Image (cartoon, rainbow, N blue to C red):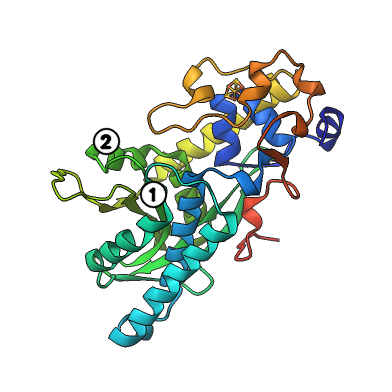
Amino acid sequence: MNNTELQESGFPPIWDNTMRQLAVACPRKLYYFLRGFDYDPSTKPAYFVWGSAWEEIMATWYSASQDILQDPVKRATHAYLSLQMGYQVWDEMNPIEKTLNKRSSFEPIWNAYLDQYPYETWHMIERGAEAGWTFPLVGTPYSLGGAFDGVIEVHEPLHGLMALENKTTGAFITKNYIDSWHFAPQVTGYIWYGRKILGDQFIGALMNLVTKNLPGPRSQWTTPRFARVVVTKTDHQLAEFEEQAAWHINLIKREHWDRWYWPKTLNKDDCCGGIGKAPCLFRPLCFSDVNPADVNHTDCPGVSLREGPWQPWLRWGSQDEE
Ligand code: SF4
């Protein structure tokens, strides 16, 4: 949509973690994002497609019933099928391979994953994969939204429900990387919603971490290829999260939407990338001397208009209260 259409559409009533992160990192980027500027599906970067394909492998694998996962023959067939589903995502988007983000790395990583986790002490609940959600923020006209990679039932050592979140990284799985998930508002948001709907039986989030690095013959890694992290939050921490989310959305409305002021980031790495950070899609627009209100998505190579509004919380498994 153009500048006027965005203004007339009104302040978004639902905010997810992506939108909030953009507002923090670079309000100008949020502005383009809200106008619907996004990756052209045919030019999505390889790192992005690799993550989507891995997510498809995970969703397929864990959607199987327990009798499939525990029968060696059925299990092998299903593992093959899961890998093929990942290839399908990769082949449809057909990205240009770059560094670790290659089609050929799925199979060795998938085989190592299956060796690492021959069985689980949890299972995906029915319709638990890719489940979207929204929930009102107390004291505001706004809601938070998001989408679980999965909702799982854990059997031991704890018993209850958890969000499952799959993450792939091109870095190594260091202690700091593992610890960082305890501080991720995206994950806190999952737990906040789960606790609102299901109370104390919603225990937390299980982070399922995978590095895309492949060990060579002389690799001397000191970090794991895979890791699992259980993130839990106290009621006080969730109340703080909720209060801060309301404050933040009100701030975005007051400082950016109402003033129609969308300043650029102060951090050049947000523009051109850095360690573990991809370059911004909208660099050409900010590099040239154009008025953001006047630009069109066709002015920026690799950008197309998103099909429909940004609503990841409306995935098929949506658990919205309607
Ligand atoms: S190029 Fe930099 S300033 Fe421009 S939208 Fe992207 S992050 Fe913001």
Of labels 1 and 2, earlier in sequence is 1
Q: Is residue 141 visible?
A: no
> Residue 255 lies in what quarter of the image?
top right
Which amino acid lies under the numbered mark 2 shown in the image of this protein? Asn
Secondary element at image label 1 = strand
Mark 1–mark 2 Cα distance, whole angstroms, equals 15 Å
The image shows residue 97, relative to residue 301, as above or below, that is: below
In-image side of 135 versus 59 (left or right): right
Q: Position of residue 214 (x, y in %)?
A: 27, 50
> Residue 171 lies in what quarter of the image?
top left
Depth order, front residue of 173/43 = 43
Residue at figure coordinates x 75%, y 33% from the top left:
297
- For label 1, the residue is 168
Which amino acid lies under the numbered mark 1 shown in the image of this protein? Thr
Question: Which-is-in-front pick, marks 1 and 2?
Answer: 1
Q: Position of residue 16 (x, y in %)?
A: 59, 43
Q: Quadrant of the C terminus?
A: bottom right
- For label 2, the residue is 176
Q: Position of residue 31 (x, y in %)?
A: 69, 28
Q: Quadrant of ligand 1?
A: top right
Q: Is residue 34 visible?
A: yes
Depth order, front residue of 91/133 = 91
Residue at figure coordinates x 40%, y 50% from the top left:
167
